[in-house]
Image: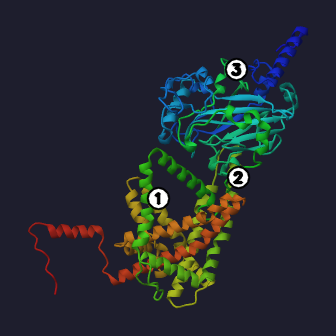
Amino acid sequence: MSRRGGWGATVGAAVAAVAAVSLAAPAAVPAAATSPAQRLVDTYAPIVVVRAQRDPPCDDQEEQYRPTTVDVALGNPRVRLIAPRRAGPRPPPKYAPTAADLARLLSVGYHIDLPGDPLKSGCTYARDFAALERAGRAPAIAYAHIVRQPGETGLVVQYWFYYWFNQFNDVHEGDWEGMQIVFDANTPARALAEGPTEIGLFQHGGGERADWSDDKLSKRGTHSVAYAAVGSHATFYESAVYVGNGQGGSGLGCDNTTGPSRELRVRPVLVPTRPALGSRYQWLRFQGRWGQREASYNNGPTGPNTKQQWLRPFDTQDSLRSASPKLPGGALLGPTVTNAFCGTAAAVSSYINLAAGTPLGAVLLAVGLILLIVVPVVLTRWRPVELDPLRRRRAVGQLLRAALRLYRRNWRTLLTIGLVTVPIIAAVDGLRWVAEQIGRDAAHGSSGLHLDLSGTVTSIGAPIAQAVVAGAVVAFVRELERGRVAGVVTSYRALLSRFGAAAFGPLLATLGAVLLAITIIGIPIAIRKIVDWQFVQQEVLLEGRSLRQAFRGSTRLVRGHWWHTLGAIGFLWLLSVMAGPVLGFALIFTTLPLSAVNLFGSLVFALLIPFVALGRTLLYLDLAAARAEEPEPAPWWGRWRRRRARDAPGRPAPQASG
């Protein structure tokens, strides 16, 4: 606005006065586009960072939606307005509801129903929103709201984000998230001159606050950067995976704001606190829900005007957390407790969603899982348990109890062998850090080459650590079977004599199965061979065979006992990956740092490696005993050829010998 001459000054003063009155009287209409209020929300409009789409629009690990206008729903002929359930006949749905329709409905029972079923969403909502974007009907905007709270000094600028769909653990139509910036000044003009003091980001039922000068807050000039989590749209300060345990309104599950990312420059649309009936933003009077009616957290959300922060932003700011727990990094051994928590929260939520949408399917799934656990436990034998001799036939239950008894008898030696993983993983973590530095230097170099080897170091280092410890346990069993005193030094010395084949043999077996699976048609063969090659390490250390002989020997030993081997190996694997996370799961809900929780899970995993290695080695000895007692089964192609020869017409039947 021109400031030249007295007339300009008079007009400017008048506009400022109108803006001040609009703040004092919330029912006033939004200020003109050039007012201090509009300039304030423009100056501090956030930059919203979302995860970029590389495979649009159906990959829900990428952000399928963006903050946009409610006009995508209002006036849309595919959208319905559903009346509340009451006694008597319900009025028919209202198609293409308008802002005027919503403004007249002060009941909380109304629902805006988007096309689709949130409990069986598939890609329906993502495709619909992509079509709205292509048609230019879904611009990136934020609804800006300036509010003062009685009894408090200063004002707050809020930015509310409306999303078409919430694709998170709590799937539901419509989603409202937001943030607010706190000023000590009492007017927009003074706020522009003095600047903000604090910021608060809304996350599920709570949020996180920070000083405007806090290092965790990224800014582009006066524009704060808010990272929207994939699907849930909860806003955070940094790119990370955040673990929410429900405390402080954090939500239950994991919010992912990591890259690859894209920045959205949202356009702020200034809205009043209490719009008048018939005004442009009268839809803000709506007390109902912006999504389909469903049970519990699958229900559509209410709008920003129903939230505490709409009228009492300072109370909300005081209630926000000062930090949000992040998923710890580092090269830990085994599956981390926090990762297991994220997966479990997602799986349980998916099951609850299934139960809400298809109750019979959920019941059948639950029964199937129970049978999968109970039936093997009931069918196997658990007694008697004997350790002399070690090379003997055992059922799976007997094998597990024998491994446990052997562990108890030699716990000092085996625990020490297991704890050797700690320095190995520390060395792997050091190599990972070096790889990160190399990758960072390469990324900032003149060549523009981005080299990141940290993930490769971690993915290779941890299996090597497991193979080393497991190999020492196999060597320990070898010494026991030969009647010698087995100790930590003796076991590792025996391992070192065949280190290359013993440490890298299991890795080669896994790599071979992966290469077969990559071909797609080789997946059945990969499944077969990954079981056939389970005892390469035992063949090397117990029988002294070369690596090639070990692969053949392991395959020959498993032949005829494939399902027995699969059941025992599968249970031992499940125990190794689940015990640490299960034991540490409850710690997620305490005040312990997540890094300490993960460390606990890794220690449990490290101490279980000797037990699992004992179980696998006793299984090997079981199969070796079976092979000694029974004739070696012919390979399937040999049996097929003999059957063909026997059934050939005109061929005499083989005579019984003796």
Q: Which residue is mark 3?
A: 276
Amino acid under disc 1: Val
Percent position (x, y) of residue 30?
Answer: 74, 20
Secondary structure at numbered mark 2: loop
Nearest to N terminus: mark 1 or mark 2: 2
**What is the C-alpha distance between the residues marked 1 and 3?**
65 Å
Give the label, 1 or 3, closer to the camera.
3
Q: Amino acid at mark 3?
A: Ala
The residue that appears at 60% across and 39% down in the rendered structure is: 52
Q: Is residue 116 visible?
A: yes
Q: To which residue does mark 2 refer?
A: 325
Q: Would you place residue 538 above or below residue 596 in this image?
A: below
Q: Which residue, given by chain and number where applicable, does mark 1 sit on?
A: 514
Spot the residue most to the left.
Answer: 650
Residue 114, x across and y down, in percent: 52, 31
Nearer the observer, disc 3 or disc 2? 3
Eye-nearest disc, 1 or 2: 2
- Identify the image quadrant of the N terminus: top right
